[in-house]
Image (cartoon, rainbow, N blue to C red):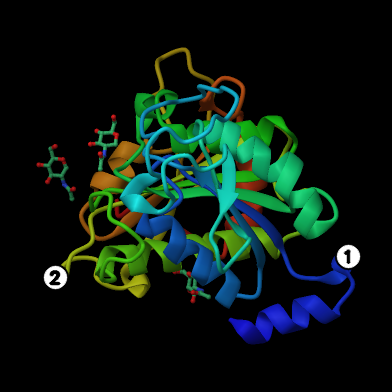
Amino acid sequence: MYRFLTICSVLPLAVCCTKVVLSNDDGWAEKNVRTFYDDLVAAGDSVVLSAPADNESGTGSSDAPATTLDQPCEFNSCPAGSPPEGHDASNPRLNYVNSYPVTSMRYGIQTLSPTFFGGPPDIAVAGPNVGANLGSTVKISGTVGAATEAAKEGIPAIAFSGTTGSQISYTAAQQPYITVYGDLSTNVTQTLAATAKPYLPSNIWLNVNYPSVSSSTCSSPTKFKFVLSRINSAGSGTAADVNTCGSTRLPTETTVVNTSGCYASISVGVATTKGDATAAQQAVVLGKLKKLLSCLPS
Ligand SMILES: *[C@@H]1O[C@H](CO)[C@@H](O)[C@H](O)[C@H]1NC(C)=O
Ligand SMILES: *[C@@H]1O[C@H](CO)[C@@H](O)[C@H](O)[C@H]1NC(C)=O
Ligand SMILES: *[C@@H]1O[C@H](CO)[C@@H](O)[C@H](O)[C@H]1NC(C)=O
């Protein structure tokens, strides 16, 4: 971790690392997002966390100016009376914003990123969310709200969500599901960021969901396979999807995550509508992530 920070600090900004803004909706002190932060840093990325001061789960694309804390941040991670935005005493890259996920993501992109990176981030990521965000749930998810906000601002974005767990403090003991979700999310982020820019077509975000993890099921990242999916079920009039796995109809993300055998879904979504992308947009993602992608068992 410190080795990467040292390398970053001696290189000119322009050639240093993948620059990542990270947010969520479960709050800046939730353990999933802190573990993902650590994993991205360990992978060599330059990362800034900009996430809500409190649990903002289910707040979709709500947006409001940040305000002074009238109570402590979640898990007592900042005292009542703290300013609208603030950071961890020992790491200025760990920032809270006392407002919604969208507001936090925008602060990360427009205010923190110029300070730490000298310009916009290369990519924005959100989560891993506590609980899956499948199908119509994307409309109310604050984690998806944060990712779609980034995409609307022209930053390639990925929302990550995992079925297992409840919200716990970053100071709590590490949990196997958090380790697995953090590893997998880092893998997807690094795989996309290793492709040519633009990482994603404009106005596109990726919606990634993981099935349950326990000591007996899907206990290691190596047990997972990623499958390209749709957010919503297709109707009879729905245009064809990209041709892959012998079909021009992708499985829904709900089907993928619900298939026995540790399948994680990657859907290609349109940020402004939170609906499914076109076959041409799906094809771009298929091309970029083909090393990661598998088919469901037939
Ligand atoms: C966070 O907010 C969601 C939605 O209101 C709620 O279901 C959940 O219980 C809250 N979590 C905690 C730890 O309060
Ligand atoms: C799939 O969904 C069904 C019904 O909701 C559930 O009983 C089953 O356990 C799920 N399977 C997996 C692998 O998640
Ligand atoms: C990423 O996931 C792929 C597919 O599961 C795997 O082959 C690869 O080793 C992983 N890479 C890293 C860095 O974890």
From the image, tell me which residue sits under label 2. 216
Asked if one can make out residue 127 in the rendered structure from this viewpoint, the answer is yes
Q: Secondary structure at mark 1?
A: helix
Asked if residue 180 is positioned above or below residue 279 in the image, the reply reads below
Q: Secondary structure at mark 2?
A: loop
Question: What is the CA distance from the residue labelled 2 to the residue labelled 1?
Answer: 44 Å
- Quick check: marks 2 and 1 in contact, CB under 8 Å? no
Give x and y (percent) for residue 92. Answer: 63, 61
From the image, tell me which residue sits under label 1. 14
Give x and y (percent) for residue 123. Answer: 68, 51
Q: Residues within 10 Å of mark 1 (few under 14, many from 20)?
A: few
Q: Amino acid at mark 1?
A: Ala
Q: Which is nearer the N-term, disc 2 or disc 1? A: 1
Residue in view at x 31 percent, y 70 percent:
223
Q: Foreground residue, 75 or 230?
A: 75
Q: Say which quarter of the image contains residue 261.
A: bottom left
